[in-house]
Amino acid sequence: MASMIDFKQLMKEERERFKQQTKKNATTLTKNDNNNKDAITTQLTQDLIKEINKKYDSLEIKELKINEKHEHKTIKDFEIKNNILKNSIYYVPDVLTEDSYNIINTIINTSTEKCWTQLKTRKLQIWGGHVGLDKEGSAVPNYLSDLSTLLNSHFKIFNESSTNNHNNSNNTTITSSNFKNDDEDDIYMKMNNNNNKNETPNHYLINNYFPGQGILPHQDGPSYLPKVVILSLQESCVFSFYKYIEGNSNERRDQPPVASLCLKPNSLLFFTNDAYHKYLHSIAAVVEDVIDSEACGMTLNKEEANVVTDEKICRINSRISCTIRKVFWQKENIL
């Protein structure tokens, strides 16, 4: 059954994790001393970031680079042409150099347990902005900032102009100008206008899925800019899309996915427009996906991912994903 992910609950669990850490260090605080508690939570985050940055700086090779075979390509060169999710999905295989891929993988895999929140179906790290905050969230580890800067400087996915930069002639930036007049699209346009069209990412999720774990079909919603970038690490999986069904619809909610993508390690997925607004997305909680199967949906990037119909995609080790987005601050939210 396709159901929505409760992101408010997810954020509540994240805050609870920090709260448990503060209890060990807050013996001098009173129960009502909320300002001091917030200060300790912030300090814990800063300490974790310092630890990660120190590890990053200690690496012999720490400059992140795009794979040289993509040197002269734009994100539009990687659009997955199809009749279901038109102008919505882009898949870049082998996006980073081998050294760069290993850097990201090493930093994440050597993260202290204090960085992780254990959820029912995966482990999670959240860095940067959170939904519902009225100000910018916590700082971000340097390797994530460097990764985001690298990807966007090359592929121009996010418009990072701080003010109305109408003179920008770079047509490689993917825009969301072809929205319909749906309420959610209007919400985005108003938010984006309030935000001076600055789409600089500020929200980073690191998900660690063990074999047999996944995430239910869901939409990310209007609290985020409708552009999602996902870097896959370690294991392959099938990423499925489901037709969105309104809550009062009589259609079956356990319908099969309408399409899917095979995400290989060191691949980049970018989706926007209809894929963001009109479809749910998910990863099945299985140890084996089958390309083009009814359970996965028609795989749209077989050639790009070098897979064939009925091929089995096995998950032996954990799969890690790094999601890069922009979340709107509460003060920017016009709702």
Image: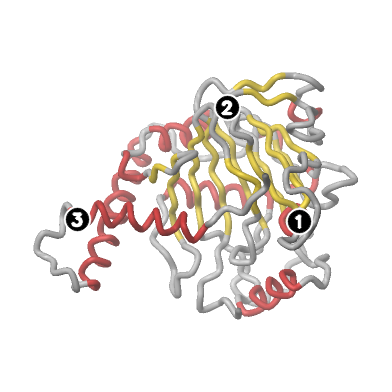
Circle 1 residue: 245
Q: Residue furthest left?
A: 28
Q: Which residue is drawn at 56% across and 59% down?
A: 201
Q: 46 or 113, which is in the foreground?
A: 113
Circle 2 residue: 235
Instruction: Establish if 303 lies above or below 155.
Output: above
Residue 77: x and y in percent read 80, 43
Badge 3 amino acid: Lys
Q: In which quarter of the image is residue 288?
A: top right
Of helix, strand and loop, which one carries label 2? loop
Which one is earlier in the sequence, the residue at label 2 or at label 3?
3
Q: Which of marks 2 and 1 is in front?
A: 1
Please rate how many residues cluster around mark 3, counting C-alpha atoms within 10 Å: few if below 14, some from 14 to 19, many from 20.
some
Please rate how many residues cluster around mark 1, counting C-alpha atoms within 10 Å: few if below 14, some from 14 to 19, many from 20.
some
**Label drawn at residue 23:** 3
Q: Residue at x 87, y 43 (%)?
A: 82
Of helix, strand and loop, which one carries label 1? loop
Q: Is residue 312 left or right of residue 48?
A: right
Badge 1 amino acid: Ile
